[in-house]
Image (spheres, rainbow, N blue to C red):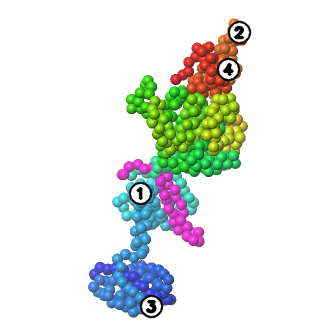
């Protein structure tokens, strides 16, 4: 018996009733089997695509085509190599094989209808005919699809698959497939590699580029500040960010830089962390041989390095009056002169400043230049402290816990109600930075599950030596007068603050005394700052 051949045809009709019936009757009269038929309507035309089986030489394809051509309304007829359905199926296959996740679908009886390249590799089915095969015959270790068909509900679980190609860990998510009437007609499983999920979570929780969407806060005060900062981002003016320590001033500065789309980098510098001479050389740069220890080839300053980017001057209130004068000139003339040099170097960097101090009072006390104050205070932003926006505490705590779950690779649950009450009752002198530290401490102390009240520990609860009664007990009281006892206590406090503060100026500010007063106390007690 001669093997059957297939003929693919495209027929164009003027649209009318009965076209399909007429074509089918002619093919039946010729005893031809219809493998597939598809009709597409385009305006007043009907395009009929056919695939029929015939007996090769025993039948005359030309006679079949001629018979169809005689039908009423037939405008054109021609054999084709590929039918529209085949093109769609091939495109569908290419798209599925391009996806990085594994995809496997079955009908309501558990017979495989679709599988892509990644799913074949994960399940070790590269060498088998899968489409049209039942799940029972495939004997897969992952029974997520079977469970989805049985329960008719969505199923998600972690799966370990060991095949000849190796071991795969993935998250299997199975969903029912329903028709327009809501009847379940199958199910589909998406297999996502666990390493990709962890990388995605890491990218979301710790983005390289900070934007305003990364600033967490739903209180009206924060929404207002964010909206104001977004408007300022498109301008070229100097932005002055004001707020207590730990409120997120640098976060806002980075978001403003990102939103401004400036091509240069974001260059931050803490003006309080560097001595005056080093701060000046870092900001302005220097020529070779400008001072002892200078590099022979010189060094560009941060304003040159930033190019068309942003320079963030954090703690600008801690600049000396001398450096303030040079920054003022730089802002006015948009030029910088390196230490020891004579050349004027044009700069295009935007300036954002930040401070937690009262600049207005410092201007009155002649500690900050009035002309510089007006130069940097063009667009001020005031970030409210955390205690004034309690609505943000829960949101921030949940956000930090989400980040830590990924980093610590722990299955941590939500923050328990009692723990949240403890967080809400705290005054937060360290603001958002303190909250982040508390949540990180709690996440480390909690092995798994919900974060309880016992895991929420504030600094004063941890440092027993910081409590007045413990500090007094630590002193040798016997046979000593009050003046000496107070002196020893003061010395211990100074030593502790010096260990934490990055500079003497910072330490003085934390203690609420002047820079000169602190230096005198250090000389009295023979203390030296820790470098």
Residue that label 3 marks: 73
* CA neighbours of label 3 inside 10 A, class few (<14), some (14 to 19), many (20+): some
Q: Is residue 197 magenta?
A: no
Residue at 39% in and 56% down: 121
Picture coordinates of residue 306 (x, y %)? 48, 41
Taking the magenta stretch, the answer to whether it contains residue 173 is: yes
Crowding at dot 2, Cα within 10 Å, few <14 / some 14-19 / many 20+, comes out as few
Image: magenta residue range: 164-192
Q: Residue at coordinates 56% horizontally, 21% vertically from top-left?
A: 529
The residue shown at (37%, 75%) is: 82
Extreme-top residue of the structure: 479
Sequence order check: which comes first, mark 1 or mark 4?
Answer: 1
Q: Which tag is nearer the camera, tag 1 or tag 2?
A: 2
Quick one: 314 or 450, which is closer to the camera?
A: 314
Q: Which one is earlier in the sequence, the residue at label 2 or at label 3? A: 3
Mark 4 touches mark 3? (CB < 8 Å): no
Evaluate whether residue 16 shows in this view.
yes
Q: Kindly check if marks 1 and 3 are in contact, taking CB atoms under 8 A apart as contact.
A: no
Residue named by callout 4: 470
Q: Secondary structure at mark 3?
A: loop
Q: Is residue 71 left or right of residue 462?
A: left
Mark toward the start of the polypeptide (2 vs 4): 4
Q: Residue 481, labelled with which disc?
A: 2
Q: Which residue is mark 1?
A: 118
User: Residue 468 got which mark?
Assistant: none
Q: Earlier in the sequence, mark 4 or mark 3?
A: 3
SS class of the residue under badge 2? Answer: loop
| Labels 2, 3: front one | 2
Q: Is residue 289 left or right of residue 313?
A: left
Q: Is residue 231 above or below residue 400?
A: below
Q: Quadrant of residue 474?
A: top right
Which label lies toward us, 1 or 3? 3
């Amino acid at each position: 018996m001669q093997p059957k051949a297939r003929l693919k045809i495209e027929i164009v009709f003027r649209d009318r009733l009965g076209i399909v019936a007429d074509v089918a009757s002619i093919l039946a009269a010729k005893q031809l089997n219809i493998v597939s038929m598809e009709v597409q309507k385009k305006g007043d035309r009907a395009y009929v695509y056919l695939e029929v089986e015939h007996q090769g030489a025993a039948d005359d394809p030309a006679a079949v085509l001629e018979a169809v051509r005689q039908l009423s309304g037939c405008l054109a007829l021609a054999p084709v190599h590929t039918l529209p359905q085949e093109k769609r199926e091939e495109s569908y296959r290419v798209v599925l094989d391009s996806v990085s996740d594994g995809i496997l679908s079955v009908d309501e009886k558990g017979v495989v209808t679709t599988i892509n390249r990644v799913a074949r590799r994960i399940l070790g089915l590269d060498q088998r005919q899968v489409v049209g095969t039942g799940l029972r015959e495939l004997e897969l270790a992952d029974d997520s699809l079977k469970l989805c068909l049985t329960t008719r509900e969505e199923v998600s679980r972690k799966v370990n698959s060991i095949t000849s190609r190796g071991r795969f860990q993935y998250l299997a998510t199975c969903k029912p497939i329903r028709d327009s009437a809501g009847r379940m007609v199958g199910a589909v499983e998406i297999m996502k590699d666990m390493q990709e999920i962890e990388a995605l979570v890491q990218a979301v929780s710790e983005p390289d580029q900070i934007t305003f969407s990364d600033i967490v806060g739903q209180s009206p005060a924060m929404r207002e500040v964010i909206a104001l900062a977004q408007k300022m981002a498109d301008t070229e003016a100097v932005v002055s960010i004001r707020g207590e320590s730990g409120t997120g001033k640098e976060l806002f500065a980075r978001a403003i830089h990102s939103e401004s789309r400036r091509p240069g980098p974001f260059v931050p510098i803490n003006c309080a962390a560097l001595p005056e001479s080093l701060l000046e050389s870092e900001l302005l740069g220097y020529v070779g041989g400008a001072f002892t220890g200078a590099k022979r080839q010189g060094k560009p300053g941060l304003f040159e390095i930033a190019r068309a980017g942003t320079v963030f001057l954090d703690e600008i209130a801690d600049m000396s009056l001398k450096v303030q004068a040079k920054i003022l000139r730089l802002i006015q003339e948009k030029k910088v002169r390196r230490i020891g040099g004579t050349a004027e170097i044009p700069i295009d960097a935007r300036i954002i400043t930040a401070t937690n101090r009262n600049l207005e009072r410092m201007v009155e006390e002649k500690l900050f230049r009035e002309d510089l104050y007006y130069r940097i205070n063009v667009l001020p932003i005031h970030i409210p402290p955390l205690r004034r926006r309690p609505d943000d505490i829960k949101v921030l705590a949940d956000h930090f816990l989400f980040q830590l779950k990924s980093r610590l690779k722990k299955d941590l649950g939500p923050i328990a109600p009692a723990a949240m009450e403890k967080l809400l009752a705290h005054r937060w002198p360290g603001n958002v930075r303190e909250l982040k530290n508390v949540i990180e401490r709690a996440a480390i102390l909690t092995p798994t599950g919900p974060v309880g009240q016992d895991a929420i520990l504030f600094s004063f609860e941890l440092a027993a030596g910081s409590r007045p009664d413990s500090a007094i007990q630590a002193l040798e009281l016997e046979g000593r007068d009050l003046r000496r006892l107070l002196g020893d206590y003061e010395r211990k406090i100074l030593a502790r603050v010096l260990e934490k503060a990055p500079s003497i100026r910072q330490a003085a500010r934390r203690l609420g005394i002047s820079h000169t007063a602190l230096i005198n106390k250090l000389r009295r007690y023979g203390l030296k700052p820790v470098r």
